[in-house]
Image (cartoon, rainbow, N blue to C red):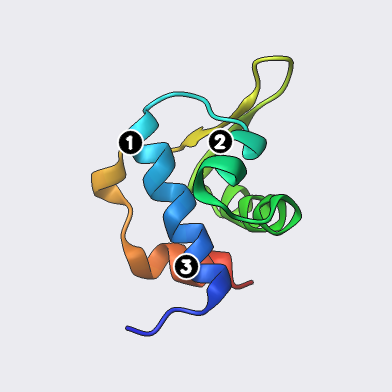
Amino acid sequence: MQLNMKSSYGLRAMVFLANAQKICSVREISQKENIPFDFLEKIFSNLQKDGLIKSSRGAKGGYILAKPSREINMQEIDRKSVV
């Protein structure tokens, strides 16, 4: 399967969230995964709309997986990231 840049970034960010198992900010993920912040915000907006991640507002806000990582597949992330 050939992934475009947006899908690749989405997959890397989702793996980061799965490994972290906690709420993570877009800034943290962007810095640690070397993904452009603005680009990642757009990707996360799409992933959130489609129910793959949940957001939390506030000083300690960020994103977390909406369901267990074993229930999310790469094709689902690819489809949701590129919208």
Residue 30 in sight here: yes
Q: Secondary structure at mark 2?
A: strand
**Residue at the location (62% across, 50% down)?**
44
Q: Along the horizontal axis of the image, is 22 left or right of 62?
A: left
Query: How crowded is the residue under tag 2: few (<14 C-alpha within 10 Å), some, or many (20+)?
Result: some
Image height check: is 25 above or below 73? above
Tell me the distance, in whole angstroms, between the alpha carbons under discs 3 and 1: 17 Å
Mark toward the viewer: 2 or 3 = 3
Residue bearing mark 1: 19
Q: Which image quarter: residue 36?
A: bottom right
Q: Secondary structure at mark 3?
A: helix
User: Identity of the amino acid at label 3?
Assistant: Ser
* Residue 54 tag number: 2
Q: Position of residue 70 (x, y in %)?
A: 23, 46
Residue bearing mark 3: 8
Q: Position of residue 7 (x, y in %)?
A: 50, 69
